[in-house]
Amino acid sequence: MVEDIIKDIKKELRANMNGVASAHARQTEDYRVNWGIELPRISMIADEIKQNMLKEEGNEPINEEMLRALSQALWNESTRECKILACMLMPTGAFVEELCDIWAEGIRTEEIATMFCLYLAKRLPYASTKAFEWIACSQPMLQNCGYLTLCHLMRQYELGEDAANEFLDQAGASLDNKYAMRALQIYASLSTECARKVKKVADYL
């Protein structure tokens, strides 16, 4: 069944491809296949997939295991749109930490890192834990994922004191990372006290 859904998704992607964007993307060699489809349309395709699955299930709740299998199959494709769809469709309840690590470690482009954090990582119950693990590691792309995830989390609530101190220490040592800088800007916007702490880090450096 998953194989049939993947075939239908690829047909839909081909029908929606942007020739100019796709040609340009192939020149960058970021992806083996890139249809150049814009994010709003990819999001609509994700909604259509869920609606089709609901119809097949007789309007019963979508089976998380089936959706997880579909998302994993999409992630395994070397295609930009498939990987973005995977991030949009993966149910958080089925996305265990071990699988999260495998996905994150396999990210090769900043765009997919951004999509992964926007549509999936920020929704995870263990998002904060993973974010701090990633910013503390030596792999640049994982660090990007960590700071991007923290950006989203900080827009939702203020970090606790211990977490904030750890974030400031790590970000202060990663000012060459644009996502660390973005996270610092967001943290500074949370309150006057947060802004004071960020200024203190900047003055110290």
Image: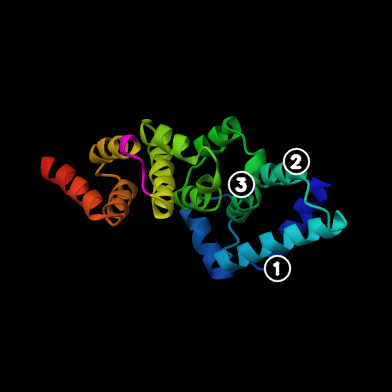
- Count residues near mark 3 (Cα–Cα under 10 Å), then give few for <14, some for 14-19, many for 20+: some
Badge 3 amino acid: Ser
The residue stretch that appears in magenta: 158-162
Q: With 158 as the anchor, is 51 left or right in this view? A: right
Viewer-nearest of discs 1 and 2: 2
Viewer-nearest of discs 2 and 3: 2
Badge 2 amino acid: Glu
| Marks 2 and 3, the one that precedes in the sequence | 2
Q: Residue at x 49, y 48 (%)?
A: 117
Q: Is residue 13 visible?
A: no
Q: Which mark is residue 78?
A: 3
Residue at the spot of label 1? 15
Q: Residue at x 31, y 55 (%)?
A: 190
- Count residues near mark 1 (Cα–Cα under 10 Å), then give few for <14, some for 14-19, many for 20+: few
Q: Nearer the viewer, residue 196 or 103?
A: 196
Residue at the spot of label 2? 65
User: Where is the C terminus found, in terms of image quarters?
Assistant: top left
Label 1 – label 3 distance at C-alpha:
18 Å
| Marks 1 and 2, the one that precedes in the sequence | 1
Q: Nearer the viewer, residue 190 or 140?
A: 190
Label 1 – label 2 distance at C-alpha:
28 Å
Badge 1 amino acid: Ala
Q: Nearer the viewer, residue 18 or 180?
A: 180
Q: Is residue 15 magenta?
A: no
Residue 97, image x, y percentages? 57, 32
| Element under disc 2 | helix
Do labels 1 and 2 touch, CB within 8 Å?
Answer: no
Residue 171, image x, y percentages? 28, 41
